[in-house]
Amino acid sequence: MIDKRSQNRDNRQMNCNCHPWTTLALLPIFFLPLAHADADADVLKLLDQGYQERAQVSLLRGAAVTLVSPDLQNGETAVGYGDATPDSLLEIGSISKSFTGISIALLSLQKKIDLEAPISNYIPEFKGTFIGTVTPHLLATHSAQLVRWFNGLDQASETQLIAFLKNYRPDAQHPAGLRTYSNLGFATLSLVIRRVTHDTFKNFVSKNIFTPLKMNRSGFADSPKAAAPLLQSYDILLRPIRVELIGDLDAGAGGIFSSANDLLKFLKANMKPESVPALSDAIRLSQKLGLGWDSMPGDNPTWKNGAMDGFGSLIKFDSVTHVGAVVIVNSKNAVTAGSLCDIIVEKKDNFRADLIPAESESLIGTYDSSDGLEIKVFMTKQGYLAVDKTKVNSSDHSFARLRTFDQKVYTVYSGTSSTDHLRFADATSQRKQIQYSSFVKSDSNNQATYTDKIFNLINK
């Protein structure tokens, strides 16, 4: 008799070198999960089904998933799909910000920084400047009126970062009191940590978070050697993406890589802080104030997502049900990572329902903004609407208001990928006062030609 669990593992390995189009043809085999304990079947069956469905719509190559739930036999597990195993190393993107938030909270409890004091107290070069008046609390909650980033931030030196920030003045799009997502803010926090501790940000996180949590395989993609073991990542059309190396300062915004097994330790520590005495108070404070988290203070579940170099990720946990998950996919689709988390944490699967059906055909076409930017809305071959943002900074235009020819305005969300599914923005996004880009429809695409052009790229 053939051991189906061994057969599944063999199938997962044999597809690592498949051509993307061949991979799609082999979906029923390629996306078989690792074997699970029989007692976990009810919980993981939903995840298995959800992954296979998303694989067919979203063009996925793999996912690493960490789960904590009272419904699991041992209360926890880590699994891999497609290319990924529980030990595969993947970039966690902006989930790194939650590590930065815990670091800032820890330094606050150690009386080394004051969360409400101006950062010029720690970086004297900022005295008399706008950035010098900003507090660590504002930086860690995207409330410091900063732009998302500047060109070269990923490898910026301390001198370059300080020079940019000393001359920075917020514009009308970044008013006081508005939460505007900013990698620059977390690079600034990395600089604060560096000045206060007289050590690099990476060393501080390694010593104070990785070590007590025994996250022995986690690290930073700061050199070719460090990045070499990372799982290959892909764009939404399954074209390989090269990992961009991240300097010490921008690492606080998104420079960490990890595995499902390591992230299981991080997830458990956040769900049960008392299990890690060295970090318990810092973890509680970071969650209470929303330091480094996307969820607002007081919200439940607590969550943070990320997207970087072809990896999409989400961590989410519920303090009432005691269910949590971390999902990382190695094709640029943060929407898929988030919806897989929801299957476990929120016991819902709105993936297809959230996608905008092709019946909303009035949305299809080309849109222009007042400052000359252009996006295209098109129909996928699976019958849903998607957006091509290759001509704009896709991360800055995740949320948009689209005005069609009949003057109807649609508020939509499309993730941080340059090409991604289109969804209607939910009420939670509206409540956060997220700034929306405005686009007006300028013409209609030749729908068949444009859709074929996008998806025929898979064959190249």
Image (tube, rainbow, N blue to C red):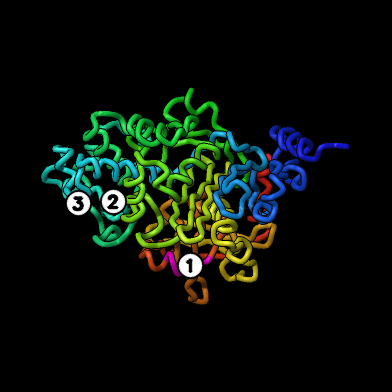
Q: Quadrant of residue 451?
A: bottom right
Q: Earlier in the sequence, mark 2 or mark 3?
A: 3
Identify the element where label 1 is drawn.
Answer: loop
Over which residues does the magenta segment extend? 424-429
Check the picture and name the quadrant holding the C terminus: top right
- Residue situated in front as seen by the camera: 121 or 439: 121
Residue receiving disc 3:
116
Three-letter amino acid code of the residue under disc 2: Leu
Mark 2 residue element: loop
| Residue 61 screen position, x and y as percent | 65, 42
Q: Is residue 146 left or right of residue 17?
A: left
Q: Nearer the viewer, mark 2 or mark 3?
A: 3
Task: Name the residue type under label 3.
Answer: Glu
Dot 3 crowding, Cα within 10 Å, few <14, some 14–19, many 20+: few
Give the label, 1 or 3, closer to the camera: 3
Question: How far from the left and from the top, in percent, is residue 380?
Answer: 65, 58
Going from N to C along the chain, the mark reached first, 1 or 3, is 3
Q: Which residue is mark 2?
A: 146
Q: How many marks?
A: 3
Indicate which disc, 2 or 1, sits on the residue closer to the N terminus.
2
Q: Quadrant of the N terminus?
A: top right
To which residue does mark 1 refer?
A: 426
Residue 442 visible to the viewer: yes
